[in-house]
Amino acid sequence: MLVSAAEMLKKAKAGHYAVGQFNINNLEWTKAVLLTAQENNSPVILGVSEGAGKYMAGYKTVVGMVNGMLEELNITVPVALHLDHGSYDACYKCIEAGFSSIMFDGSHYPIEENIEKTKELVKVCGEKGISLEAEVGSIGGEEDGVIGMGECADPKECKAIADLGIDFLAAGIGNIHGKYPENWAGLSFETLDAIQQLTGEMPLVLHGGTGIPTDMIKKAIDLGVSKINVNTECQLSFAAATRKYVEEGKDQQGKGYDPRKLLAPGFEAIKETVKEKMEIFGSIGKA
Ligand code: 13P
């Protein structure tokens, strides 16, 4: 059964580790992430962006697929199905479809409007036992065609949103989605520290987990990050393994064109990436 992410992140915060959110794109992705979590006895959050939801034929399809897998694959570790960077409308659609966790990304609204809409969703999610992530300070890079620069959130605005009763907070600390440019300045630990000082026990979320050096990840966890989002890195390892298979001509040997064979190296590559991340985040054995 899907669970809210509130409890797992509270535990992560107290235990000084982070739970990975791995974004899913299709059946192979979902199965790879779930099996890796089970094999490593780790809690896990499946992230679904609006674009990925549309690609997978809608939120209800995603809920059906994930619930089916939890049962058929005997997944017993805590799993949350989470809307990633949701618009106001998408939040309601996912609540209705059966997601166990949502992110309302109101970071592009003026802070007053972000507060108003987040407050409303706190009430709706609270009634249904669904966990809610909010965002302050836009996280740069490209996601679903939206490009922003890596900003640092205002700690006071973070406090205002945290006090609304959300379950975890994404705050920009110079992180961006996708690959980091050569001249990236790194994470702003000063900002992270200032935000955590003001927000106390609130679990913080680090987006753009792809390509952040391990020492920075560990320091971010020390300073209060309890959830780390990874998307691009699984895509890169899937693509590299699939390219290798095709370049070696394996799709043309025997029944190598069978999708169950063609997609197998990419599937294994995702599993490896997810396991590596879980090791770094410290979530292995914490289910
Ligand atoms: P990356 O694609 O950089 O790993 O970021 C994922 C993310 O933050 C999803 O919200």
Image: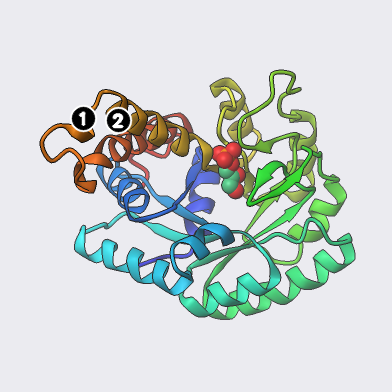
Would residue 38 be visible to someone looking at this image?
yes
Residue 250: which disc? 1
How far across and down, in percent of the image, does residue 226 sit? 56, 44
**In the picture, residue 141 is in which quadrant?**
top right
How far across and down, in percent of the image, does residue 50 sit? 58, 62
- Amino acid at dot 1: Lys
Which class describes the residues within 10 Å of circle 1: few (<14), some (14-19), or many (20+)? Answer: some
Q: Quadrant of ligand 1?
A: top right
Residue at 78% from the left image edge and 56% from the top image edge: 107
Question: Which residue carries the number 2 mark?
Answer: 246
Would residue 226 be visible to someone looking at this image?
no
How far across and down, in percent of the image, does residue 185 sit? 76, 22
Q: Is residue 137 left or right of residue 68?
A: right
Residue at 30% from the left image edge and 30% from the top image edge: 246
The residue closer to the viewer here, 16 or 18, is 18
The residue closer to the viewer here, 54 or 132, is 54
Whether label 2 touches label 1, CB < 8 Å: yes
Q: Separation of disc 2 and disc 1 at Cα? A: 6 Å
In terms of secondary structure, where does tag 1 sit? helix
Q: Is residue 215 left or right of residue 30?
A: right
Q: Is residue 135 above or below residue 62?
A: above
